[in-house]
Amino acid sequence: MRFGKGHAIGVALAAAAIALAPVLITNGFYLKVLFLIGVNYLAAAGLNVLVGHTGQKSLGHAGLFAVGAYTAALLTARLGWNPWLAFVAAGAMAALFGVLIALPALRVRGPALAMVTIGFGIVVEKVVSEWQDLFGGQAGIYGVVPPSIGGSALNDGQWVWFVGALGIVAHLTIRALLRGKYGRAFMAVNTAEVAAESVGVSVYRFKVLAFVISAVTCGLAGALIAQQNQYINSDFINFNLSIFFLLIVLFGGSSVYGPLVGAVVLTLLDAFLARWPTAQHFTYGALLLFALYAMPDGLSGALGRLAKKLVPALARKPALPAPTTGWKLRATERLAADKPLLQTRAVYKAYGGVVPTNNIDMDIKTGHIHSLIGPNGAGKTTLLNILSGIVPPDRGSIEFAGRSIVHMVPNRICAIGLGRTFQNLKLFADMSVLDNVKVGLHRHMRSGFWSCLLGLPNAQRDERAARDEALQILDFLGLLDKADEVAGSLPYGLQRRLELARALATHPRLLLLDEPAAGLNPQETQDLVGVIAKIRDLGVTVLLIEHHMDLVMAISDHVIVLDYGEKIAEGKPAEVQNNPRVITAYLGTDEPDEDDLELEASHG
Amino acid sequence: MPSVHRFAKLAVAGAIAGSLWAGAAYAQDIKIGYTADQSASGVAELGIAGRWGFEAAIEDINKAGGIMGRKVVGVIRDDQGTPPKAIQNMTELIDAEKVHAVVGPANSGNALAWLHLPQQKKIPVVVPIGTATEITTRYAKEPQNYLFRVSMVDREQVALLGAYAVKASKDKKIAILADSTGYGQGGIKDATDILALHGVTPVATEKYGPKDTDITSQLSKIKAAGADTVIIYGIADGTAQVLRSMEKINYMPVTLGTWGNLSSLLPKMAGEKLSEHLILAASTTEDTNARTKALGERVRKNFPTLTTFPCSAQAYDSVMLLAAAMKLANSTDGEKVAAALENVTGVEGVIKTYNKPFTKTAHEGLSVADFYLARWKNGAPVRYEDQFTKALTPADLKK
Amino acid sequence: MGASLLQAVFSGLALGSIYALVALGFNITHNTTKTFNFGQGEFLVAGAYVAVSAVLLLAGKPISGALSEIEVTPGRYFAALIVSIVVLGALGVLLYHAAVKPFVGQGGLAWVMSTIGFGIIIQNTALAIWGPAPLVMPSPLGNQVIRIGGAGVLPQEILVLVASILVMACLDFVMRKTKIGKAVRAVAHSGPAATLMGINVSAIVVLAFVISSALAGLAGLLIAPITTASVFMGLTLALKAFSAAIVGGLNNARGCMLGGFLLGLIEALVGLWQAELREISIFLLIILVLVLKPEGLLGRRMVEKV
């Protein structure tokens, strides 16, 4: 993670501008407008992490603004706290409420998520306006004490400095966070939750974290407003405020500069069009109506593209170092050779009358390649979903490396060494190929939240090591030259390979592959045989579901056959191929199956 | 389609340029600011009425040669009924527009939010509409209080209503029903205090939301407490819903209301028959005298749907008093004008002629002596008289 | 107490039927396009104002005039209803093309913002034409309180209830039994599949928005005589109707209707007990329901294929 020279200059310039502004501008109104830009920026910067990056659309953040504002107000006006401490406490209180709103929000998505956040915002709004004994209702709370320096309260200029400093800190920390493993994890949760879990990213924890970050910045924004006005009342808190914050984020765009341009434009519009209220309202409405159509990735996206066109140097990505060594699997403790790596006993799952998994006993031996075959609807993917923790079994035991993994969360199952790929590709399509693999390395990057937030040297080291390792993995799978491309733009076969790379990055002991050859042409299928063999040679045990019989026969040490949820046969490939029960259920020797026909057609 | 964002940027640039240019042009003129809700809620009716009274006054002053030979310019802002906007407007008026005085606002809550600004920056303010008592009393102990008012201040209104209620109620069982806005909140406080001066404690105090349509539950509780007299604290549309709810549960106690019910919305929304039931505090109506009539017609040219005429009259008179003070002080300096306001006399407004309306300790242009009880009859407010009003003496008007 | 309870039930059902009407509008557009009109509240306002203006014009007065009770005859009211529905339907078409069509199919919140923006423009247009004063619309059935079992009920409240139920029953019938209803449901399941069956998907989608907007307009017109109608009344009503739809199940028409009535009833009953806690209790309840059953009471769980 490098501190780009251009970026450093930009930050220095901004700091200089903020420092000079109160000196050059004496008009109190303009200074207050600058202050307001800062406050709106702060709120939007955190909200951008939640909405723009983690994809959780919240329409209730006015509630968190209220929490911060009233905490600061009550602590200083009623309890006589030191205003600086009260300011910090406001942020802490808002963080708590961020967890509160996150918990119900975890369980819902789409319109229901919007509803939960709206509900939260309205409940807070009503509580502060109706509980008049505590919050003062519309009459509000007077005598909110602002922070002071040298005995006197901050003046207009000093407020600009204060909010400017906060803004720069927020920008630097959030940018550091988003450029590293946390930012990738947020995007992963946004794009494909199930896939994120399967590579060790705890969706639950990251959603809560995103809510908390947005809550803290909104809460601090509220405290700033309350303390600067020395007054707060329930009129400050309404649904339109939530929409306004959201608009700043959406209008500005999800890039890290989005909240800044959004806050600047919208605050100035609001302040300077105030003398023509009709024009102001219509402009606001038109902005909401057309802006996202004209600029789908916001103003910062449009400006960024413009800048790259004018200054091509900005579009060039830094060169990636070539990997020097081959990739090796991380050493894990050896299991006794006779103990199975994965063992299931009597695993059972039913959906109403349908039983896709009916008392399955299975042993997966370390270092072997196992295949799971069976007709469509036999329950193969269900079994894989049960093993990887996405679906809980009704009954039965599953032991992986000697531990029971029943009812374990998927990201934990990944952490102890069970990785997987998906039948319907679940790549993080908007991220680069390299970043996709880096998400797979998430669990193995040891730097914690604070190191990443502050951009400490150990976090930077971690990032460099992750980049190098990810490049090794890509090299291992022949994807090195595509490292900087957007994952969704790759041809289908390479996308499948990328998902494989991502799963490998989790350093699995057992890798579950769900129809890895689906949609591949015969040449690609042939290549896949070699790839799986290489993976086995690295030390990874493989269990794959497949319909392509040539692949199964060529690569497997052991084949398990399912039909209608039951295991009907298992053994070496040749044994299974000749098993009459299997033939009846599945192989059907009289009619050539489509794969043979295809092969003939392509060879003929 | 980058044109949208280009448009937005141009608009912003244009607005900044425009405001800077506008600021420079009026260096010699006397600027008086007006800030009130004109677009965001029911209170906008009052804010707009006030605005046209304000503009009419400025027109008249300029026709008569201005103040000290200088032209008077009104700087109008809409505070959209919210404190953040109201505070921003005040900051803009004082710091950017550099007004010499301010008339406004309509919402008491907004005034309470920005009071400290004109007080700190020494800009005199005359409030034409907002009635919360605290507006003119908060800085009463300072060497100079910059907040004045020409409106039906809550304390005085409630003194009149309270006096009547105490006389009219059989067992002194009086209830207060207020809306949940800052206006209602202040009203509860004033009403409870004044009733206490009469030795009466309200048997019930209930609140309703300003947009509520069903107040039957609160009224049932008041009825259950045995109240035979109710003081309603809210504006016309809320009061109309209260009256309709009363009719629904067949509970018609003696009902008193504040000046906000002078709005023609009340008979329209509650119906003529029901609106007659309400006894309200009033001071000025369009037919008070020839001047008010003329002003009413004038305002209607710009605002044909005028509903609350008193606001226009009060705003007009506010400007007149400011002009007189500036003439008396022979200056536009805030401190001098504020001091002069406390000494002006013989100022002709549309409501009345003001003879030493303000003193060092009293900043209210209108007092209970200017108020009377009224009710709606045949679509117009008329003075209300019954045996209780006749029995009222000045001593009863405890405040 | 019994009379107050009955009172609350009546008002609750009347208000709830309004929520149900608007919620149904949300259901229809969401089913067909996965979007809905976040500015639906402003459509309610437009419906009320257009209707009042229509009655005024029919009575020979200017649109900024005031209505008295006798001028609102049932005939004029019904004519105003037709006018209102037609105008709102047209607005719905405009809304679809300006605010929804550019964003259908994309994830994200763009359509939320654009429909809110459209609503703001409508609100300010109404403000510019009619001003901020509350709207006075006397009921065509008069203001005489009817006593039923000791409870006072306004004739308009009964009209609201009856009219809403009639409209909802009609829509329910159309959706389930007629060809066009089947077409709408087909589009709701899968646009591409419906096209292959020869259904004109874009026409159906536009129809969905026309119906949804017309419902909002109807709701506005029905509620105006009872409530303090003004250009500002839209947001609260729309939010509550939206909540009703989500609680009942956004993808289930009957769920939306159920949600509306339920919400109206709970609001009235809680209001009876403690008026200040009305909205707080409703929204807390909604959050609770969503936590326990994210797809709503009658909604279908959308299973993601893994």
Image (cartoon, rainbow, N blue to C red):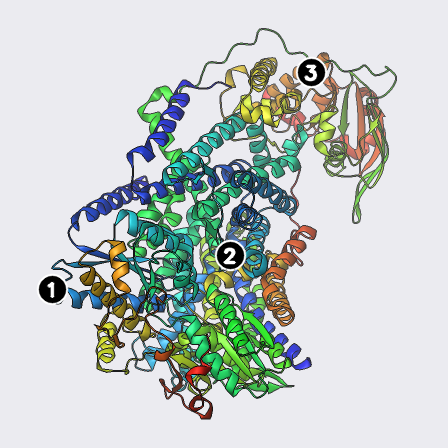
Report the amino acid beneath label 1.
Gly
Specify the subunit that label 3 lies on: A
The x, y position of residue C79, in whole percent, is: 40, 78
1 and 2 marks in contact (CB < 8 Å) = no
Residue A271 can be seen, yes or no: yes
Q: Residue furthest top?
A: A324
Report the amino acid beneath label 2.
Thr
- In this rendering, the answer to whether B109 lies above or below C6 is above
Q: Which mark is residue B65?
A: 1
Residue A258 can be seen, yes or no: no
Mark 2–mark 3 Cα distance, whole angstroms, equals: 50 Å
> As drawn, is B319 to the left or to the right of A440?
left
Residue at mark 2? C29
Q: Nearer the viewer, residue B199 or B380?
A: B199
The structure residue drawn at horizontal position 53% and vertical position 40%, both measured from the top left corner, is A87
The x, y position of residue B345, in whole percent, is: 23, 70
Q: Residue furthest bottom?
A: B387
Residue at mark 3? A535
